[in-house]
Amino acid sequence: MNEKDIRPRSELTESDIQLIDAMQSNPRASWAQLGKALAVSPVTAMRRWQRLEDAGEAWVSVAFGPRQQSHIVFAFIEVMCDPGAVLDSASELGRMSHVITIVATSGDFDLFAIVFAEDLDAMSTLLLEDIPAVPGVRRLRSNVGTQWYGGTRWRLDAINAEQAQQLRETGVDNEPGEIRPLDVRDRALFAALSRDGRMAYTDLARELDQPVITVKRRLNRLQRAGDVIFRCDLARSMVGLHAMAIVWLSVPDVDIDEVARTLSSWPECRLCASVVGRQNIIFAAGLNSIPHLTRVISRMQKMFPTTVVGERSVGIRPVKIYGRILDAEGRCAHTIPIDLWPQT
């Protein structure tokens, strides 16, 4: 079921936070692995997670890995809406499977969104036709990305290094080979995992009408090659992450790779990518408070004196995060599976 029966807001316990961080370390770890790392029984780990997931407080999603992020087309859009239409426009945009993330923001634009498309033709249709046609949208500004550096996965750092090591995932192949688009079966598997990133192999096999061993081999291949990864997210305000800021940077071309790779390693990083435009890096930071942004920017300027910090805005409400529609408290209400491919 996509729809969540959201409970009244509760406080996360320290055990909840450690479990979520363990999931962030390895989102598809077995209950036995999780229980061993956290010194609880597998059944206890499973029950705690089920409670968090049922409440919409934490969830696991599938995401495009490094290889596919370099193959598909992505763009960052800023939307100005009619007065009083921001949330309605955000809701309409959120129904689009190509629009994977939406945040209501301060500043000249009302919404910030991340858009994925199979190719440039599909992206042009989204930017020139589909998104401008959404009721309430008055103006659209877009920046097409060139390379995605980081932020798809991040951690709370609530478990220690030894526990994280116990949960370590198998790395990608050293020589993953030629990048290729996901085929029809890969796409069906991706769509199923978009609804539940921890769906069991037996359930995936039943849904896809394939043998369990076939599904397991296919998913293992996609993970090893870096075509797909998994991410664990949560209602961020419940762990003190009360704000997000989006910062645009102008960096000398020769420094883009170094600056972006460094920023993507910062604990605040929720997004770091290079784009085509006068400002050529976008960085999104998860913040404990608005003043936290000042410290982040000061660190940027000290570390990279040739970098010019340009426009910045504050996310005042997340609406959709990587395919998950959020309620006003930031909890997952339901899922819009990511689907970039035309129906055949």
Image (tube, rainbow, N blue to C red):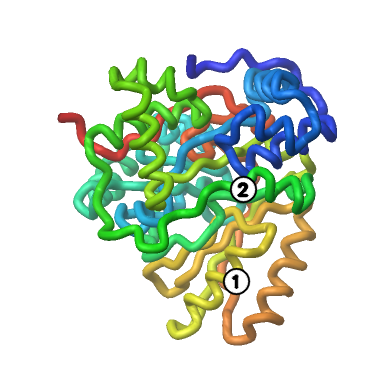
Q: Nearer the viewer, residue 10 or 49?
A: 49
Percent x, y of residue 245: 64, 56
Quarter of the image for residue 280 reads bottom left
The image's mark for residue 204 is none
Residue located at (67% from left, 52% from top): 286
Residue position for label 1: 262
The image's mark for residue 168 is 2
10 Å crowding of disc 2: few (<14), some (14-19), many (20+): some
Percent x, y of residue 338: 38, 35
- Total marks placed: 2
Residue located at (38% from left, 54% from top): 69
Q: Nearer the viewer, residue 47 or 280?
A: 47
Residue located at (23% from left, 47% from top): 122
Residue located at (48% from left, 77% from top): 256
Q: Nearer the viewer, residue 173 or 222?
A: 173
User: Of the residues shown, which amino acid type is indicated by label 2?
Assistant: Arg
